[in-house]
Every structure is written in C-alpha cells, then in structure tokens.
Amino acid sequence: MRARRLIVRGVVATVALLAEMLAPPPASAQESSSPAASLGHEPYPGDSPNAGASTHFRRGVQLYGEADYAGALVEFKRAYSIAPTSATLYNVGEAQYQLQDYAGALKTFQRFLAEFGATDSHRAEVERSVEVLRTRVGRVSVTTLPVGADITVDDRFVGKTPLNEPVLVSVGHRKLAASMNGRPPVVSYVDVAAEDDIPVKLELPPAPGLVPAVATPASAAASDMPRTPAAAPSGGSALRIVGFVFAGALAAGAGTFGILAIGEEGALKNARNAFPAVPATVTHDANLITIFSVLADSMAAGAIVVGGVTLISTLSSTNTDGAKTLGASTTRVAVGPASARLEVTF
C-alpha cells in the first residue's frame, strides 16, 4: 500500500510540473523581465517623418533599461519636444519618478491626465501614481527684497519674483537661491516635509561700493535759520560731513558682509556633511564665503581710513582760529570702482 501511495503521488507531481511548464508566465513576471517593460511603447511608426523623435525615444528606452534614468529623461524630453505624444510624456514622468524628482513627476503626470488621459491605456496607473506623489511634495513661498530676483531650487530656475504661486518641491533638504545683476546672490536651505507650505524671505545685499544718498535733518534745519555771510558753511565743513557719512556706510557694509560670511559657513558645513556630498554646492558655498570675507575686510579697512582722516581734519580745524581756519582747509574725495581716496589740506 505504501508503494502504491508513493506511485500515485509521483504521478500527481509529474502532472502538476508539466502543467506549470506549459502554462504562460504570469503578467507580473512578464512585466518585470526588463526595467523598461513598464514604459510606453514607441509611438512613432517606421515610416514616420519624425525620425529624430523615434531615435531619441529608443535611446531613452535603452538607457532606462540600463538604470541610467537621468540620461533617459534627457532623451525622452528631446523626443517630446520634436513630436509630443502620450507615450513619450508618460515616459518622462516615469524617469522623473525614478530620479525621485517627485515634484517634477507630479506635474508631468497631471499634464498627462489633462492632455491625453481620457482614452490612454496608462490612465489608471497614472492616477494611482498621482495620489502617491501628492504625499511626497510640499510648497515653498519665496519672496525677495528687492523684487525682480531670479529664483532657483536645487540649481533649477523656477521664476522671477514676485512669483505668482508657491513653488512645488519634493520632500527633503532643498536649496533655495536668489540672484540679481549687480548684487551678491543669497542662498538658503530648508527641510520640506509632505504637504508643507513654508514661507522663505531672501534679502539681497546692495552692490559692493554703492553708497546711498543720505539727507541729514540737521542740514534741512540749518537752511531755515537766518545766516550771515561770516557764518555760511564752508566747502571743507560739508566735505567732512560727507566723509563721516561715507565711513559709516563702509562700516555698515563691512558688518553686513561679515554676517553673510558667517551664515555661509553654516551652509558650507551642512553641504559637506550631506551624504552624498554635492561638489558643485560645496565649491559654490566656499566661493561665497571667500567673496563675502574679502568684501567685509576691504570695507572695514576703508571705513577706518576714511573715518580716521576725517576725524583728524575735524580736530585740526577746531584747534585753529574758528571760521578762518575752516575756510582755509580743503578736503577732496575721489572714489573709483575698487578704491576710495580722501585728501585733506590744512
């Protein structure tokens, strides 16, 4: 009896094995046989006039299959720019998804649903992906002072302030930068969680060497007082006031750039501690620290020189015969693109 049971079990096992071998493989196994199996099929016929689009599309599929998603994204975008199709746009979103560019993938898939999703076979899959991606993005509301600055997120241009709406970004550690012609750029880092809406204000410092015009209340009050020819202010006295104002502006600029340099040191430390470290970010932050430090030191030295010479001129004038000495002393200021010179004659 035992031998008979073993024979029966052997026959059953043999039949089951043959059935499994003759049956077609399951759909999941067919789809997972290649990394690029889930991509859209080539939408360009062999005799299509869009030969260039077809070439880029095939290259994108090949790179995607090799897990080179960045290269595949470039090829799919190039194919779409030549001949827009639903399959190509779908593949753009898939490549962005693999690169963990969740914000980019979400915008691409939403565009897919709006333009092609009504009858496309990938509609249900894209709708599921959109629901997942909405839990992997946040928003950043960026403002600048002054307005008109170019804004980048992770070194990608997103617009010029004032922005019409918050910027959609992927969750994680994001780099925000503002730049404007004639002003040093400003960089800030924020950690964005899902569904965040974070306000960020970036203030761009004035251009190096720019001295704003200053109106002093004392001058306005003096213009309303009765004066005699002997008491009229001399050119030397007015220029000494300008000297003190210029020294103060240089000192303020030195303090501003010193604070910026200290802030960039923290950003550089974070960039170096990040894993994996981005060489371009580390180099950029290190260059900013050098620029801000040089500007702070130069302006501080200029403030000391200008303030000291102006103070000596003022003290020397008060030790002489009053108005006569004030009228006899002269002060000349020469300002160049990268230098400042003050000449005083007693």
Image: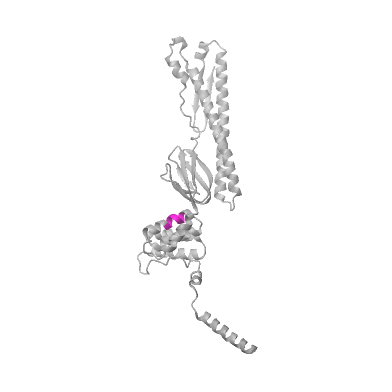
Magenta stretch: residue 298 in it? Answer: no
Quarter of the image with the N terminus in it: bottom right
Q: How is the image coloured?
A: one colour
Image position of 148 (left or right of 13) = left
**Image position, residue 80 (x, y; %):** 40, 59
Q: Nearer the viewer, residue 269 or 294?
A: 269
When asked about the image quadrant of residue 77, the answer is bottom left
- Report whether residue 294 is seen: no
Q: Quadrant of the C terminus?
A: top right
Q: Position of residue 198 (x, y in %)?
A: 49, 45
Q: Which quadrant of the view contains residue 284?
A: top right
Q: Main secondary structure of the magenta part?
A: helix
Q: Is residue 95 left or right of residue 274?
A: left
Res 19 visible: yes
Q: Provide the residue span drawn in magenta.
A: 104-109
Counting from the top left corner in percent of width and height, residue 337 is at 49, 33
- Image: 67 above or below 201: below
Count all numbered tags in the image, as a single digit. 0
Q: Which residue reaches farthest right? A: 2
Residue 43, relative to residue 293: is it above or below? below
Q: Is residue 56 above or below residue 271?
A: below
